[in-house]
Amino acid sequence: MANHPREEITFLMVKPDAVQRGLTGEIIRRIEQVGLKIVGLKMFKPTLKQVDEHYPKDKAWINRLGEKTLATYAKFGYDAVAELGTDKAEKIGPMVREWLITFMNSGPVVVIAIRGVHAVSMVRKIAGSTMPSDSELGTIRGDFSVDSAAAANRDKRAVYNLVHASETEAEAKHEIAHWFGKGEALADYERNDEMVMYPSAKAR
Ligand code: ADP
């Protein structure tokens, strides 16, 4: 039988901007208050290599970053050629990826493994949409940032959007192995509210 839904695991990273703004506790609080369980946690300054290996290197992902940036330039009337020297998505994508890597390597981050019902989609929902300026109030990005692609691209930097959250269970598995190490076991403990939240599930 498939795992009980409460066994779903996801990965969240508190990015350098959120750590430097003292938001780590607030972010953890929001995860725990919905009933999701922290099962792995550590703070450190990632190396350039670790960050580089975190973000996909495939052409489709990199081109998508370039296309999103071009769409922003078109929307706000910015001249991509004047600002970035090109208007080709396949040339802009790698630049945006570099901005991201520089940003993620700029200070300590907190990596968090989270277990619970619909953990992947719930954590994405709590995080808000990629651009804080588009995020709903009540989400981490919507409540604590006004950053936008337009502002970030003008400054030639990544969007400072406080957190990264895995998009799928497979991505979470890969990211947890990357950031926690393949052999590192996640914590296994019972929260006392689980008895109320999952009355019929066998106690862990
Ligand atoms: P998410 O982190 O919400 O899954 P993406 O995978 O699309 O979003 O992008 C990865 C990260 O790259 C974002 O979190 C953001 O920090 C940065 N980013 C995405 N698009 C842009 C852009 N157009 N300009 C600058 N930074 C961007």
Image: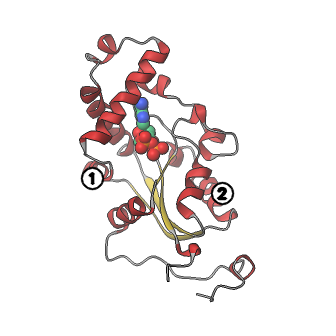
User: Can residue 171 be seen here?
Assistant: yes
Above or below, 66 against 202 in this view is above
Dot label at residue 30 = 2
Above or below, 168 against 161 in this view is below
Residue 63, position as x, y percentages in the image = 30, 34
Q: Residue at x 49, y 23 (%)?
A: 151
Asked where in the image residue 192 lies, by quadrant, the reply is: bottom right
Kind of residue indicated by mark 2 = Arg
- The mark that comes first in sequence, 2 or 1, is 2
Query: Relative to residue 130, is residue 158 drawn left or right?
Result: left
Dot label at residue 165 = none
Residue 180, position as x, y percentages in the image = 37, 67
Q: Residue at x 60, y 69 (%)?
A: 117
Q: Dot 1: what SS?
A: helix
- Please tell me which residue lies in front, 141 or 62: 62
Asked where in the image residue 33 lies, by quadrant, the reply is: bottom right
- Please tell me which residue lies in front, 61 or 26: 61
Query: Relative to residue 114, is residue 56 drawn left or right?
Result: left
Kind of residue indicated by mark 1 = Glu
- Please tell me which residue lies in front, 9 or 42: 9
- Position of the C terminus by quadrant: bottom right
User: Can residue 155 be seen here?
Assistant: no
**Mark 2 surroundings: few (<14), some (14-19) or many (≥20) residues within 10 A:** some
Asked where in the image residue 103 lies, by quadrant, the reply is: top left
Q: Residue at x 56, y 64 (%)?
A: 119
How many callouts does the rendering have?
2
Residue named by callout 1:
53
